[in-house]
């Protein structure tokens, strides 16, 4: 009986170590081929925004600021202008409105925008129900867009002044109920 002083080791683990060891040593010294660069997604979005700004129709160009002025008129028939349960009164309401839309590309990435609608309500049969002042349409806003890397940050102030008794269910026999709304916010 012969005793073998060294038991035979399987060949697979030795071959695997012989192949993997040089790869591990080389991997630690491997360098990346591309330099780190900032993402172009934010710049691409800003460029698309610039191109869309160039396509906006305007009436007046004052330097870099584009203005668009428009006038609209709305006509409404209301069968209960007072929101009354008894003695309901009907009327035709004419609502002229003047709109100003302005956009200013402050820098290549940042824009300032103003949308403002000013109007008036004129009641044909009940002049005492006419608007006491200027109404500001609900779509009015002042906003500023800032692009920082991949993010578009929008700072905005949305405001309106309406004559709307319908919003308050407790009111009855009230025509002129002014309501000012102001929403300030940020979106990313």
Image (cartoon, helix red, strand yellow):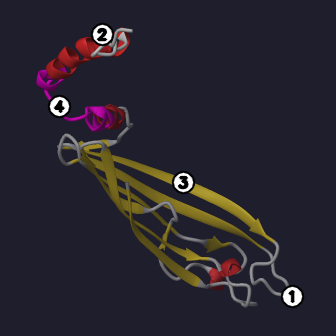
Q: Which residues are magenta?
A: 27-46
Disc with the residue nearer the chain's start (1 vs 2): 2
Q: CA distance from mark 3 to mark 2?
A: 84 Å
Disc number lying in front (3 or 2):
2
In this picture, is 37 found above or below 63?
A: above
Q: Identify which residue is drawn at 49% across, 76% down.
A: 181
For label 4, the crowd category at 10 Å Cα-Cα, with few meaning under 14, some 14 to 19 and many 20 or more, is few
Q: Which mark is residue 37?
A: 4
The x, y position of residue 129, in whole percent, is 65, 82
Disc with the residue nearer the chain's start (4 vs 2): 2
In this picture, is 138 found above or below 11?
A: below
Q: Nearer the viewer, residue 57 or 110?
A: 110
Q: Nearer the viewer, residue 126 or 63?
A: 63
Disc number lying in front (4 or 1):
4
* Disc 2 element: helix
Disc number lying in front (4 or 3):
4
For label 2, the crowd category at 10 Å Cα-Cα, with few meaning under 14, some 14 to 19 and many 20 or more, is few
- Which residue corresponds to mark 2? 15
For label 3, the crowd category at 10 Å Cα-Cα, with few meaning under 14, some 14 to 19 and many 20 or more, is few
- Which residue corresponds to mark 3? 72
In this picture, is 55 found above or below 146?
A: above
Q: Identify which residue is drawn at 33% across, 13% down.
A: 3
Disc number lying in front (1 or 2):
2
Q: CA distance from mark 1 to mark 2?
A: 95 Å
Pick out the residue farthest to the right: 86
The x, y position of residue 79, in whole percent, is 82, 73
Q: CA distance from mark 4 to mark 2?
A: 41 Å
């Amino acid at each position: 009986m012969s005793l073998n002083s060294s038991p035979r080791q399987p060949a697979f683990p030795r071959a695997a170590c012989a192949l993997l060891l040089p790869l591990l040593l080389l991997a630690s010294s491997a360098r990346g081929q591309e330099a780190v660069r900032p993402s172009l997604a934010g710049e691409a979005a800003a460029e698309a925004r610039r191109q869309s700004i160039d396509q906006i129709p305007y009436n007046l160009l004052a330097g870099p600021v584009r203005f668009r002025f428009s006038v609209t008129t709305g006509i409404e028939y209301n069968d209960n202008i007072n929101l009354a349960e008894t003695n309901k009164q009907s009327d035709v309401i004419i609502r002229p409105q003047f709109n100003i839309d302005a956009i200013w590309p402050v820098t290549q990435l940042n824009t300032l925008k103003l949308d403002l609608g000013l109007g008036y309500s004129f009641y044909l049969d009940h002049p005492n129900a006419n608007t006491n002042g200027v109404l500001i349409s609900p779509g009015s806003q002042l906003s500023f867009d800032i692009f920082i890397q991949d993010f578009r940050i929008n700072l905005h102030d949305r405001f309106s002044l309406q004559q709307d008794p319908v919003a308050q269910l407790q009111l009855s026999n009230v025509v002129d109920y002014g309501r000012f709304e102001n929403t300030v916010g940020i979106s990313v």
